[in-house]
Amino acid sequence: MSNFNNEELEKRFQEKIDKEIKIEPNDWMPDAYRKNLIRQISQHAHSEVVGMLPEGNWITRAPNLRRKAVLLAKVQDEAGHGLYLYSACETLGADREQTIDDMHDGKAKYSSIFNYPAVTWADMGAIGWLVDGAAIMNQVALCRTSYGPYARAMVKICKEESFHQRQGFEILTTLCKGTEQQKAMAQDALNRFWWPSLMMFGPSDSDSPHSAQSIKWKIKRFTNDELRQQFVDAAAPQADILGLTIPDANLKWNEARQHYDFSEINWDEFWQVLEGNGPCNKERIAARKAAKENGQWVREAATTYAEKRALRKTA
Ligand code: FAQ
């Protein structure tokens, strides 16, 4: 490999991508590809872990034992997703602790959606249906991403997210078939989670600095706006099945486009949340920092135990 100059290596790298050959950890890759992947995968991992907080809050308040067991399993799944993704990130040479500290210091982002509060039980339904639904729309495409470890992690994650989405839809179906008050609670959750769910797909294509290069490298297979449109097209008929109204007066099937039209997103709100000014940003970071500090003794004990075992083996 050392016989080739950078230009030649980059040409061969792009040829591999174009032929749909996966890039593996020990393969040559441009620094910018590695950096971009570490950025995206680590932020994805942070999102899974921070995403445990709004739902984790409801485990003790779930209305019955079945709901509690299912919610507990879902929140544990999210922790597992975080772990696969941190591991995928490590295959690129990233230091896991450093990526986590970057989030705690505000240098790395996590999904905007988790800066909104979950205030009623219906929010567990809305998060499953809409937030996991949006996550799957994005992640099914990532199963074909060009970096092998990320693509393989996504296959497993998507299977679990699909179960999460169904459990959310089932919670809302039950509420919508219940009393007037329960249906109103479901509608209220949809009203609050609809727009933040659309924001999960990222800025519009014209304001997305990473998209063009990520699509060329086949890290992303679709643009932010394409995936957002697919999500709206899937969610609109699902809302009809529930008998709920999506809070957008302009949401309408467009026969010519074969897609739903919908209103412009409040991008000012989106950027404000990314800046750290959403309803729960400070609370979420404080919770993650406290978790790290409170877990310090566990990490120290595990390291000491591993060292002792290694010593015993060599003695
Ligand atoms: N929130 O140029 P682009 C889940 C940032 S998992 C915060 O378009 P890109 C599971 C972006 O990072 C949900 N930041 O960037 C679950 C960049 O900032 P940077 C997470 C956002 O990377 C469910 C800047 O804006 N999923 O929910 C957001 O090409 C239920 C410019 O943006 C993933 O992470 C946002 N919404 O496209 C867990 C999927 N959007 O890095 C618990 C993987 C954009 O320059 C409960 N990630 N930004 O400082 C991706 O597919 C992409 O990274 C996008 C953004 C599509 C999110």
Image (cartoon, grey):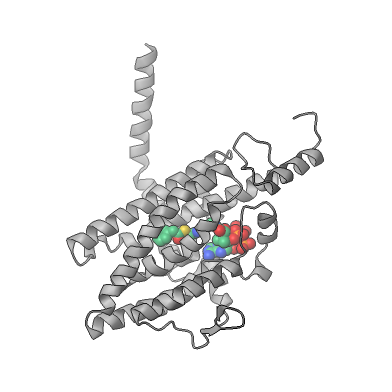
Looking at the picture, does residue 134 appear above or below residue 292? below
Picture residue at 51% right of the left edge, 57% below the top: 140
Looking at the rendered image, the quarter that the N terminus falls into is: top right
313 vs 272, nearest the viewer: 313
290 vs 200, nearest the viewer: 200
Picture residue at 24% right of the left edge, 85% below the top: 180
Q: Find ligand 1 in the image and state its quadrant.
A: bottom right
Which residue reaches farthest bottom? Answer: 249
Which residue reaches farthest left? Answer: 65
Q: As drawn, is 71 to the left or to the right of 221? A: left
Residue 158 x, y percent position in the rendering: 44, 54
Picture residue at 29% right of the left edge, 53% below the top: 73
Q: How many marks?
A: 0
Residue 136 x, y percent position in the rendering: 47, 60
145 vs 275, nearest the viewer: 145
Q: As drawn, is 99 to the left or to the right of 169? A: right
Residue 120 visible here: no
Residue 179 x, y percent position in the rendering: 22, 82
Residue 141 visible here: yes
274 vs 55, nearest the viewer: 55
Residue 302 x, y percent position in the rendering: 35, 33
Residue 227 appears in which quarter of the rendering? bottom right
Looking at the rendered image, the quarter that the C terminus falls into is: top left
Picture residue at 56% right of the left edge, 77% below the top: 259
